[in-house]
Amino acid sequence: MAKVKAKSRKAAKKRLKITGTGKLLRMKQGRSHIMTKKSSRRKRNLENPTLVSKSFEKKFTRLIVGL
């Protein structure tokens, strides 16, 4: 019987990036529309990626690696 190849979740792979130390980066929410009422400082802070919280890190890593 052939072994089944473990596949990664493509949606998670497109949204997350693994850093060199193994942590996960994600983009911040709230940057897609209704930008006029948000201040320039707020919009600038939304541009930068942020780390995924520790509670979700293990779960999302499994989705990307395909286990």
Image: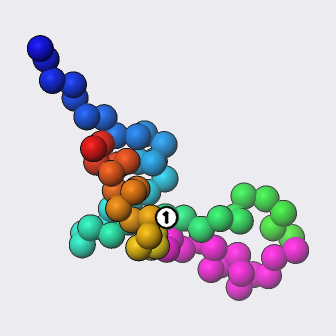
Residue 35, x across and y down, in percent: 81, 67
What is the image's colouring? Answer: rainbow
Q: Quadrant of the N terminus?
A: top left
One can see residue 12 in this view: yes
Quadrant where the C terminus is found in the figure = top left
Residue identifier under label 1: 26
The residue under the point 43% across, 39% down is: 10
Element carrying mark 1: strand
Q: Could you tell whether 11 is left or right of 20 in the image? A: right
Pick whichever, 28 or 43, lies toward us: 28
User: Label 1 is placed on what type of residue?
Assistant: Arg
Q: Nearer the viewer, residue 27 or 55?
A: 55
Q: Is residue 42 above or below residue 3?
A: below
State left or right for residue 28 relative to residue 65: right
Q: Residue at x 33, y 51 (%)?
A: 62
Q: Nearer the viewer, residue 7 or 43?
A: 7
